[in-house]
Image (cartoon, helix red, strand yellow):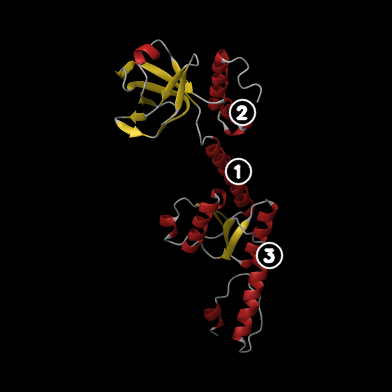
Amino acid sequence: MQLSEKIEILPGMPFVFYDGNLEKIKEIFKKEISESVNSELSKRGIIVKADSLGSLEALLVLLKQAGIPVLKAGIGNINKNDIVSAKANFKINEIDAIIAGFNVSLDSEVEEMKGSVKILMDEVVYKLIENLSRFREEKRKEIEKKRLMGLTTLCKLRILGQYVFRNTKPAIFGIKIEGGKLISNLALIDDSGEKVGRVKNIQSENKSVSESSEGMEVAISIPGLNFERGLKGREFLYSDISENQFKNFKKNKDLLSSSEMRILQEIAEIKKQKKSGWGQNL
């Protein structure tokens, strides 16, 4: 009998009697799968693959209970079409750029083309859902932090006074990032609250970089600054933030690291030296 070769019977499909009625059987199978799967799908969500129809149905129910929406679901290994669908999700919502695979494997070409798509697979359904929930929450916080840091970032810099490469036009000197992250065009204040200027360029190992992180020692250039007159004797530089930005950081403090929270508090204390009650009446 060659029926299975023609309609690709999969685990979990209904079993019916064949009496030359191939087209009718195809319609029965198509309707069965469509009704079972489509009832659990959303207009947005992740991509799900499982090894059988029964497994897929159970997985979709559990994902719904966990509050994880599913846009597309299917049976079989994770393939290039799944990657394409997940990449389309990335453009809409990074949290949904995920493929979850239960008891399946990857087609050979998938690893090379997955890019920004996250693939999570497991043979234990509850572990798969637990890992999915954890990853989505971490990704949500990462996205929120990017949004929060969109206009500025928090950092504390130690001035390395022994490395002054140019005094002015622009001033170029060495610093160490004590905490947070330094980015180009960031406005800085010194540890007495005086405005220093904006970082025009960051160099690490003689190469220009757009940002540098905690622990790194780099050289920065600041136009309009005379190092000898403005910074000699000073020890630290900080991000220059507004009171509204301070309010937003405090409101989203769960997204900040302990180092960033400490820097935020130090900046507030410095600002209060210039303006009593700074940041308290927002």
Quote the CA–CA distance across marks 1 and 3.
Answer: 25 Å
The image shows residue 33 at horizontal and vertical percentages of 64, 71
The quadrant of the image that shows the C terminus is top right
- Residue drawn where x is 58% and y is 59% of the image: 48
Residue 32's disc is: none
Q: Amino acid at mark 3?
A: Ser
Residue 39's disc is: 3
Quote the CA–CA distance across marks 1 and 2.
Answer: 23 Å
Pointer 2 residue: 247
Residue 97 visible within the image: no
Q: Secondary structure at mark 1?
A: helix
Name the residue furthest right: 65
* Image marks 1 and 2: residues in contact by CB distance under 8 Å: no
Q: How many residues crowd mark 2 within 10 Å: few (<14), some (14–19), many (20+)?
A: some
Dividing the picture into quadrants, the one containing residue 211 is top left
- Residue drawn where x is 59% and y is 62% of the image: 73
Mark 1 / mark 3, whichever is N-terminal: 3
Pointer 1 residue: 137
Residue 27 visible within the image: yes
- Residue drawn where x is 63% and y is 85% of the image: 18
